[in-house]
Each structure stands twice: as C-alpha cells, then as structure tokens.
Image (tube, grey):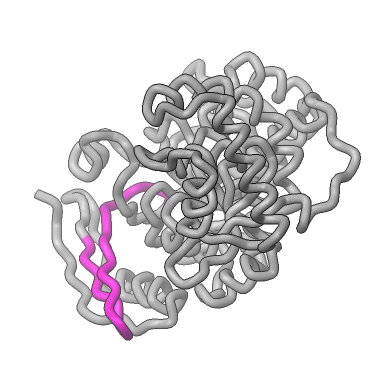
Amino acid sequence: MDVTDISYQRLHAQRIEGEHCQSAAETVEWMGAIQAQDYNLALWAIGLRTPGSTKSEVEQSIFEKKIVRTWIMRHTIHFVSLQDVRWMLELSSERMIKKYLNHVEKSTGLTVKQLNQATEILYLALKKHQQLTRPEIRIVLENAGIPTGQQGLYHILWYAAQSGMVFIGPMKGKQQTFLLIEDWMPKSTPLTQEEALKKLTIRYITSHGPATVHDFAWWSGLTISTAKKGMQLAHKEVFKETRNKKEYWSSVNTLTASKGDGLNLTFLPSLDEYLIGYKDRIDVISAEAYAKIDPQKNGIFFPLIESGQVAGSWKPKHKAAVINLTIRLVPTVSISNERLKIAAEQYCYFFEKSLGELTIETIL
C-alpha cells in the first residue's frame, strides 16, 4: 500500500470521492465529528461531502437540531449528530475536564466551584428562556457575580458543554445560541465505556481510514493505550495492514476504493478532516508542498486537493453576490484553468453566489 493508495482510500472513506452522502445529517453522522470552530468553513466541509447541497440546506439541518456544534473532543468545537452527543461525551468528558481545569483556572481565575456555580445559573436561565446568545449569557452570569472576562465566558460554556449540559444551537444573526441537551435529547440507556469506545473506533476508521492508532488517538483526544484497546474491541470490523513497518487500520469500505473516480480536484476548507483528522499528514502532502504551503505545519491553510494529494492552496474573498478566489499551485503541479474554474464554481454554488475574479499563481 503506497501513499497514492492511502490518499485514494481516504478520499472515499471521507466521502469526498466515490459514494457521497445524501444529506448534511448523513454526512456528519458518517464522519463521526467534523472540526467546526470556524462556522462557515465547517459548513463547507459538510457541503463538499454532500454534492449539490447549499449553505441554506445545511443550516436547515442545524435549525432542525439534526446536527449540532459542541465541544466533543480535543477542547475543540465539532459538528456532531445530536443523537451522538451523549455517548461521545461519556467517553471523553472526564479526561478532557481533568486535562484542562488547571489551564482554565490559571488563565481566567475561575475555580471549579465557580464553574459549577456558573453552570447551575446557566441551567436555570436556559430552562426559563430555552435559548440564549453569548451576550445574553454573559449578562446573566455577570448579574449573578460570576466573572466572564479573560475568556472566562468561553471556558464556562466549554465546561457546561463538556459536562453534557448544553450545546451550540442555530445562529441568531451573527451570534451563537446555546440550548440544553435534555430539552432536545431525552435520556436513554447509556453505553458502557467499552461499547462507546468500540463505536467511536469503528466510526473513525470507517470514515477516516486507512489510519494509525496514533491518528485515532490524536483525533479523539484519547490515550494511545485506549486507542489500541478500541482497535481490539472493533477487531471484527476493522483490519490492520503494514507498510514500511507502519500499521494502518481500515474497514471494508475504505478497502474497496479505486483510483480515478470523479474529478479528483477539491477545494478543502482550512482544518478539514482530510488533514486535521490525522496526527501524521505526510500521506497526503509531500515534504515540498508542506514547506511551501504550510511551513508551520499547523494545518492553517486552505488545501487544494488533486488526485488525493495537496497540490496547492486557495483563498476565498466573499462579496455580497460573488466570491473572488486566489489559487496558488506548487511548482510541480499542472492543472488546467478549466478544471480549477469548475471546482471554484462548485464552492461558490454552495454559498449561493457567483464566481467573481479567479486568480491563479505558482508558489515560488
């Protein structure tokens, strides 16, 4: 299994190529979780895996609470299916809270007692109002004597979400809203830790494989030993392959991928699962491309994917009715302007705008 095989299989597993998902809700459930601290970029991450969809259609799934945003793993906001929130949090919340509590107190001065007080106040306010924006929550907490400065509000909301009390609801204008999980998802028989771990392992490998144990641990925020246990629990659904003494895990779905399906040219958002979903990204981006496009190796760029590999970067500039795009290709890549235009128009279609200026450059 060479690098090309890995990248093609991942394209199929992630529903970027081959069999696509038919709705935003189906896409998010398939992926397990989609990193989503940037709202519009995360919408496009869903949209590119749901061909023919638009921003409005994806947002309708958010309004209907089929998909939600919350802090589900790695202290980072993700899109997840509402029905998956409880069992995913039961698997990860205790470790995440323990890991970040000291950081919260050092950076904000908020103690565990104050965080618990804040969540109690927030719970009562949401029971009364059903839905509150960030500014409204800040007022409620400040009036109750809870400090929200120095990112205190952010960490209070993270703590409430990580504890399984709230999730981020539909946008109200430009403001996030917050709702109670119990109002939208009645309690059910919880999964055991092993059941939840097995389910998450299968979900990740099916949607991201081939991937390593270290990739899974990075993505989920679990320890290496827990990630290994997940593979053992899911041994009937996932399969191990070795390449250059490196073990990759796959599912039946990822193993059936074939080269050459579809256009194989995609504009990915920054922090897309195709890159950020793995600890080691060298299988889809060469050392040369990495050095030119992302010298910090932090994934903060817009990848242009051609035949499974990062071929350059791109940057959109949204206007009222059009989107201007600048594309920068690595020197070794040659892609026709027509193919680039088609991919650009697909992006613009999702946001229900027209393609404006299209600038194509070579990275020197």
Q: Against 317, is 109 above or below?
A: above
* Residue 168 visible from this viewpoint: yes
Q: Against 267, is 104 above or below?
A: above
**Rendering coords of residue 225 (x, y %):** 63, 14
- Can you name the residue that lies furthest to the left here? 364
Residue positioned 71% across, 53% down in the render? 82
Report the number of discs: 0
Residue positioned 37% across, 47% down in the render? 309
Q: Against 132, is 63 above or below?
A: below
**Rendering coords of residue 214 (x, y %):** 53, 23
Residue 323 shown left or right of residue 145 in the figure = left
* Residue 256 visible from this viewpoint: no
**Rendering coords of residue 159 (x, y %):** 57, 36
- Image-quadrant location for residue 329: bottom left
- Image-quadrant location for residue 117: top right
**Residue 1 lies in the magenta-colored region:** no
* Segment colored magenta: 308-327
Residue positioned 73% across, 32% down in the render? 90
- Image-quadrant location for residue 288: top left
Residue positioned 52% across, 39% down in the render? 156
Residue 23 or 152: which is nearer the viewer? 152
Magenta highlight: main SS: strand
Residue 100 or 252: which is nearer the viewer? 100
Residue 34 shown left or right of residue 147 in the figure = right
**Rendering coords of residue 28 (x, y %):** 63, 55
Residue 200 or 15: which is nearer the viewer? 200
